[in-house]
Image: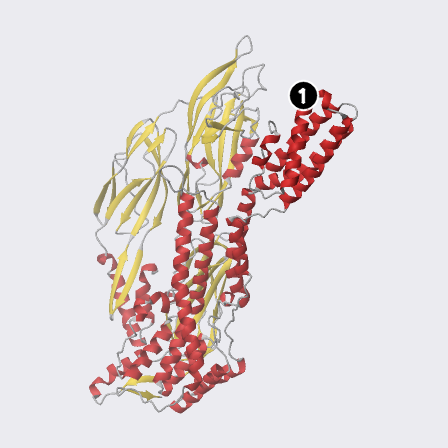
Amino acid sequence: MFHGRDAHATRSFAGASPVIRKFILTGLTALAASGLRAAGPASLAVRANRSRIYLGESVQLQVVLEGSNDRSLEPAFPQLQGAGLQFLGSQDNSSRSVRIINGRMTQETFLGRVFIYQLTPKQAGRIAVGNVTLTLNGRTLTARGPVIEVTGVEQRDDLIVTIESSRQTALVDEPFTVTLRILIAFLPAPNEAIEPLLQQRPPHLQADFLNLKEVRGLKQPNLEARLNEMARQAGRAPVFTINNYQSQGFGGSLFDFGNPFEPRPLPFRLPVKRVTHEGKPFWEYGFTLDYTAQLEGDYTFGPVTLKGAIIKGADGRGNAIMDEVFTVGPAVTVRVVPPPETGRPDWFIGSVGRNLRATATLDTALCKVGDPLTLTLEITGDISIGNLRPPVLGLLPGMPDDFRLYSEPFATETLENGKRFKYRIRPLKSGTLEFPALPVAYYDTEQMEYVTVHTQPLPLQAQATTQIAAVSDDPLLEDTQALTAADRQPDGILLEPANNGTARGLQPTRQRLLNAVIWPPAGFLLVLALRGAWRRRHVWAAGRRQARALPHAHRGLRQAHRLAARDPVAAALQGAQAIRAYLGERLGVEAQGITAAELPARFRGMALPAAPLESLQAAFAELEQLPFHPQAATAERVAELLKRATDDLAQLDRALARAPRRPSADQALLLLLAAALAMPGAARAARMPDAFTWERANQAMAGARSPDEFLGAAKIYNDLIRDGARSGPLFYNLGTALLMAGDARNAEAALVRAERHLGATPEIRNNLRLAIAARTGQPDAPLPPSRVFLAWHYHFSFHLRLWLMLAGWALFWCGLTLRLLTPPPAGRLRTVSRRRAFANLLTGWGCALLLIYGGSVAFTALQEQHDNRFWHERVLTTAEALPPTMEAKP
């Protein structure tokens, strides 16, 4: 089976003529027989997945053989001592590649196999694997094995730590579990019901697979949620600490008088139950984690170490006797392997699972010879997606010579339950053709065997087309000129009127453009408003206090007025205090200690009326002095002062309420952006051609044989443009029709407009180059240099450039929004935080995209506006002859 390195070769092989393909197949057969001799010299290598382990653990050895894939070979370990060795299996590691460049074919064959062993040391120390030998074709290959450091651990009967997996080998997308178990023996009677852990001195567990980090190729459980659940259940129960998980500030016991600001190990309450192990009762702590492998490879879990103190018993006074322990739970390795090699077909796509479905469709059932067609292959089912690779069309059995095949897909889309691949094919013959059924093989995990499903054959009607060929009087150059004519054949027309029939969801309609323009700054406005509200929370609180100031003062003055008849001195004191309280709440200052002499200074700059202010100052001053002159404090005088203070406060409060307020900078920016967003926007999507007229034009184009007939089809396309239709395929078909009619100048103009709408597709570039060659009389005329220097402008369609501009618009506002949420640089060094640097980066990228593609979109819009204005003045004709070296040929 050929692999991914053969893409170039496959395309050349599929596009060759039948005679050349037969020659190539003969050469392949001959090369295959000499593949082993063409390969490099055989070699052997040995590697281990771990170099340091604890006694009781195992390590995997991989013996890598290059030069043969014979599964019957057996490596030998003559120098290995002090360890057990178990053969786990082998895997074919071969690959082949074929390259066809300028008609010359070369084949590269690599043969290899990997033998996998499990090595289990029987003692601590250094375990040297020594030389590993293998006999191949009478020759002995030797490789030096690694040295494994084995650390001994004291084995205990009362403490056992293990890591167990539900399976040692698994297929891709096959679930498995990993269980951590800690067994601690019961305490002696009469303390059997007490767990042997002290909550104040929890033992510590260290295991890398319990860290919150992603492992490539492995679908992991929600470990964070599991740890949070065990942390919440800790309470006052016996617990463990795990890895370096810590809590910040005021954690732990209320009676722990350590530094409350230092991080503390976070306690975890592991699920516990009573079990019997080898006839003895134990407390079992542990939990199970669910995993699913998404890529092939070896996944190691562990080892886990337990270090700390456990309760060994109790003394005569009932105090716990602690025992310091250290033990290790051996690691386990789960090998995720490919399906078996036996019975594997060449069209195996790498996926495993159940109920695979394969569906193939063509984007049209009617075309012309040489038209690029899109073959869509959709593979779905209960299958693994990570290792699903696209079939290589040129290597599938039963592929006919009626099509030019581009073996690799030009687009791949991941679906919820599969993948969708899109290939490019071209019919090479006219008539009724049939694209054959495609075989797709996968490994069925229910039947435990390879299963092949087939797509449905696809019928296709291909009509003959007109070629543009070079003409020469020299008969010796006839064959060469025929090949040149094939290379210069214009690409066929497009059948879909929309700019991109497969991406209508990206059409820039009015509603989508308005959403893209409005929502980014609207989000910025929302964050700006929330930030302004947060910053003004104290102002609003002060405003509420100011609004309550006058009612509170009136209430206090009324109480003082009722008290004046019984105790004028106390009423004067209470009246003065009510005025102070008003001033404190209304002005936001400390009320205690305010005197009448301070009133002018307190109200300076507030543009208050002088009469009530002076009256209030005099009444306030007299109320302050009356307690020191009791003989002058009569009920009538105090009541008069209180009434005057009530009226003066009401007048001053109304004047303060009418004082103008200056809007803040945030409010001004908020109002400015809101006004900008409220401006009406205009966005008009391009109108699609009339379906009936479009089909009539396509039929006229398909049946055209002479320049006049091509000109007739071009005029139908041009009538659609005059009626206001605008789309890339319309301009492309018009340009192709004019090119076939001989009107190179107008063909070039139409193809340039098609390039604006569709971007620089291979079909447009090919036909545009032919139009320029016909206009200039230079058969090898290149495209203008601007297509290279401004590739970012010409390569992308107008719609894509418009969305890139809007993406820059969105990034710009996202960056500004993030800057609002990030404090500015502070301190003498003015260090910029990572979040603010990221915000600046977003803003910069947004500005760059906005400026670059905004200018590109504006330039295209101006060009289209100019062409729309003067397009009706163009005269379509066949009068313009082809270059001297070119002629129309039916």
Figure quadrant of the N terminus: bottom left
Q: Is residue 324 left or right of residue 319?
A: left
Residue type (three-letter) at the residue carrying disc 1: Phe
In the picture, residue 584 is in which quadrant? top right
In the picture, residue 471 is in which quadrant? bottom left
Tally of marks: 1
User: What x and y, as percent, mark residue 506?
Assistant: 49, 65
Instruction: Identify the residue under disc 1.
Output: 628
Q: Is residue 767 visible?
A: yes
Relative to the observer, which residue lies in front, 791 or 445?
A: 791
Point 40% across, 84% down: residue: 737
Q: Answer above or below: position of 442 versus 882.
A: above
Point 33% across, 26% down: residue: 124
Q: Is residue 427 visible?
A: no
Local secondary structure at mark 1:
helix
User: What x and y, as percent, mark residue 156?
Assistant: 44, 21
Residue furthest top as drawn: 316
Relative to the observer, which residue lies in front, 830 or 30?
A: 830
Q: Is residue 637 left or right of residue 327?
A: right
Point 64% across, 33% down: residue: 617
Q: Is residue 870 left or right of residue 49?
A: right
